[in-house]
Amino acid sequence: MKNKITRFDATDYLDSEEMIAEYLNAVIEDDDLSLLIAAIGDVAKAKGIKQIAELSGLGRESLYKALVPGAKPRFETIFKILKSLGVSMNFKAPNAA
């Protein structure tokens, strides 16, 4: 009997602000900007691109362009997207508990 492998899609699990925040916190620990942008894109898809575009004040096309692999969006754009996703950034010292 063959094993059936299904594709993992993070958007299936991003159903609360707490889960979204945990997902983004886990991704940011990898220090990979491309991975972070992809994760923000996952969250935007989970919440609905149309809704996030409206809340962020960005056009849907601009939102897609900002979150495509290899994109280098401006910090202002990422900040608007994060705010529209209902999450905020916090900073801590590297050795802080």
Image: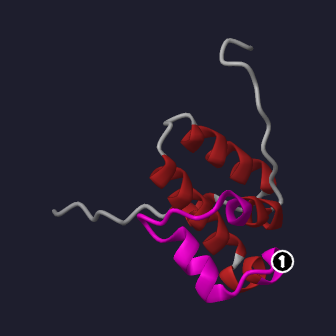
Horizontal relation, residue 31 to residue 6: left or right: right
Quarter of the image with the N terminus in it: bottom left
Q: What residue type is labelled 1?
A: Leu
Image point 79% across, 55% down: which residue? 17
* Horizontal arrangement in the rendering, residue 18 relative to residue 62 (left or right): right
User: Where, by quadrant of the figure, is residue 60 drawn?
Assistant: bottom right
Bounds of the magenta segment: 54-78
The extreme left residue here reads: 1
Residue shown at the point (53%, 78%) measured from the top left: 65
Q: In the image, is residue 60 above or below residue 30? A: below
Q: Where is residue 47 in the image (x, y as percent from the top left)?
A: 71, 72
Which quarter of the figure has residue 80?
bottom right
Does the magenta-highlighted stretch encompass residue 57? yes
> Would you say the magenta stretch is mainly helix, strand or loop?
helix
Render colour scheme: secondary structure
Which residue is depicted at the point 57% across and 71% down? 66
Question: Image height check: is 51 above or below 95?
Answer: below
Task: Verify whether residue 70 appears in magenta.
Answer: yes
Image coordinates for residue 5, horizontal then vertical, percent: 29, 63
Residue 43 percent location from the top left of the image? 64, 64
> How many numbered marks, from 0 up?
1
The quadrant holding residue 81 is bottom right
Nearer to us in this view, 46 or 92 = 92
Where is mark 1, residue-wise?
A: 55
Can you say which quadrant of the picture contains the C terminus? top right
Badge 1: few (under 14), some or many (20 or more) residues near its Cα, within 10 Å? Answer: some
Q: Residue at x 62, y 82 (%)?
A: 62
Q: Is mark 1 on a helix, strand or loop?
A: helix
The image shows residue 83 at horizontal and vertical percentages of 82, 61
